[in-house]
Image (cartoon, rainbow, N blue to C red):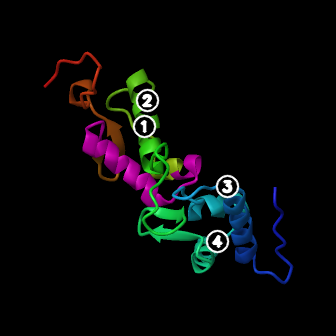
Amino acid sequence: MNVIDRDGPIPVYKQIASVIREKITRGDLKPGEAVPSEAELSLQYGIARATARRVARELREQGLVYTVQGGGTFVGEPGVPPPTDQTPVYRRIAAEIIDLIKRGDIPPNRAIPSEKKLMEKHGVAKATARQAVAYLREQGWVFTVPYRGTYVTQPENWPRTEGSGDDRS
């Protein structure tokens, strides 16, 4: 693990950018893959979000990454397709919650984890947690009660999945 020298002459954001640049050079981060989010960098290095933002700017200025508004920062030039196995983070979070719902770990009319809990567990920004919940709502897995939370819908309202043997139309 790389140690960040908080008292040295090189700014912290430049040191972290250097760590990420090394990962890109070694091939640990491939073209089209997401670099750690601001939230992930904040948690991992104990830095402010503004500092994490400067890391991304530094890497962009070096021509190593590009940023998609609301989508993240990715290795390579704009338009480089992500690896085929890379599912957006919000979809991975949503899939985990769907699994909990299907297994009955979160029954109908019970709350799913809050945005804050999703942010903490997955090391993501509020916008990403919100996007996961919005996706679940759009799919019909959950409904939101203002100022109360987001709850699992009744099974008859769940989306039909291919090959599930479910005849609902």
Of circles 3 and 4, the one toward us is 3
**Amino acid on which disc 1 is placed:** Ala
Give the residue at mark 1.
95
Q: Name which residue lies at 69% across and 71% down.
A: 17
- Magenta region, mostly helix, strand or loop? helix
| Callout 4 secondary element | loop
Q: Write the start and end of the magenta stretch as one range.
A: 119-143
Q: Which residue corresponds to mark 3?
A: 27
Horizontal arrangement in the rendering, residue 116 relative to residue 48 (left or right): left
The x and y percentages for residue 36 are 60, 59
Image coordinates of residue 107 in percent, x first then y, are: 37, 26
Residue at 40% across / 48% down in the picture? Answer: 132
Amino acid of disc 4: Ala
Q: Nearer the viewer, residue 49 or 57?
A: 57
- The CA distance from mark 3 to mark 2 is 32 Å
Q: Given contact means CB atoms under 8 Å apart, are the residues at marks 1 and 2 in contact?
A: yes
**Cβ–Cβ under 8 Å for marks 3 and 2:** no
Sequence-wise, the earlier of marks 3 and 4 is 3
